[in-house]
Image (spheres, rainbow, N blue to C red):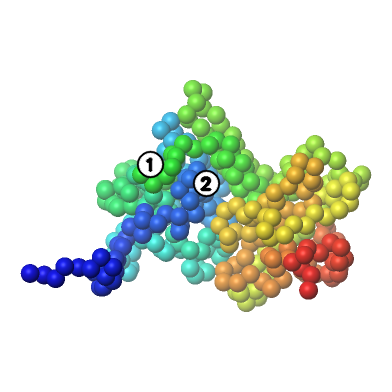
Amino acid sequence: MAAKKKANSYDESEIKVLEGLEAVRKRPGMYIGTTSSAGLHHLVWEIVDNSVDEAMAGFCTRIKVNVHPDNSITVDDNGRGIPVGLHPQKKISTLEVVLTILHAGGKFDNNAYKVSGGLHGVGVSVVNALSRKLIAQVKRDGKIYEMQFERGKTSEKMKEVGTTKTTGTIITFWPDDLIFETTTYNYDTLHDRLQETAFLNKNLKITLTDERELTPRVDEFCYSGGIIDFVKFLNDGKEVLAGLSKPIYIEGKSDPDAPVAQMGEVEVSMIVSEEGVVIRVKSSDVSKLGRSTQGVKVMNMSPTDHVSAVARLVVHKKKAPKALDENQGMFDLSAAGAKDADDEEPVDIGGEEEVPPDLLDDDDEE
């Protein structure tokens, strides 16, 4: 007769191995932070950020986000489309690899994407794992391919369903009510985030459609001025210093021949408030939207505060240039040019100025 196992025993049988996307479903908070409404909306951000990466690479000009009556979501872009051929390592469709295997993506070297918002490769596979159903359609090489999944596992193998003259990826997913506290999307949350994404990606057209209403609500975002328009939007209705109503715009990028670890781009746009004070906040007071590598920051402010600066950073893989110090919120602009938003020629702004002690945050003081 086998010996009875002790209640407090710890042996080889206690070590569990989670296969595929089981780990995501077992501990979803490790991947999306929470299973509350914030985590629910994070699923949309992950898919949209993949489309934004295509836009940043120069292959996508529009993204459509549809909220269907049953609170399923469709994200449709006109990028290159996820590759569908046989994967050289896994010997299955690359589309299946991307959707069912963690850390599978085209952003771990500099070939497919020179810049990207996400480098961890868990985005769409995590969405798949946390959805009771997901349908992926890919338009590529003149054909339309479709594949279906249920709770992260393949339910229908990839098949060809039509022909097309366009390219792109369409992801439709139904969040799993066994995972999330709520599966009802908030339109305002989607609206604000997608609008900010459009501001930060100049000329990218993003359309949000809510089909849950009798007459579908549609909002379209596209800004030729990028962060210049963002600053104008944030300061709408607020007083600024006379003669400084036009945003100041600064941009710069590394030399094309610079080492990869030192490559990057920076854009800064600002309006000086009526008090002439530049608002600075500690890192703890800044809420980050999107992936941590995307450099998107939005300040939490009181109704009486004025926005003084908004910056969009694009860093080419590996490390951010030493000139970009996230903790201090300072930029070395000695190699960049400053110009009025409507001016053509940049104005040399010279080297850095020493920050007066009274403007330093407590954490900045030595």
Q: Above or below — where is 133 with respect to 355?
A: above
Q: Give the image location of residue 137, x and y in percent.
A: 38, 46
State if disc 1 and disc 2 touch (CB < 8 Å): no
213 and 10: which is toward the camera:
10
The residue beneath circle 2 is 38
Q: Quadrant of the C terminus?
A: bottom right
- Measure the alpha-carbon separation of dots 2 and 1: 14 Å
Q: Give the image location of residue 295, x and y in percent.
A: 63, 59
Q: Residues within 10 Å of mark 1 (few under 14, many from 20)?
A: few
Q: Give the image location of residue 292, x and y in percent.
A: 58, 60
Describe residue 44's horizontal placement relative to residue 226 as left or right. Answer: left
User: Which residue shows up at 16% across the image and 68% down it?
Assistant: 4
* Amino acid type assigned to the residue bearing label 1 in the image: Asp
Residue 100 quadrant: bottom left
280 and 95: which is toward the camera:
280
The residue beneath circle 1 is 177
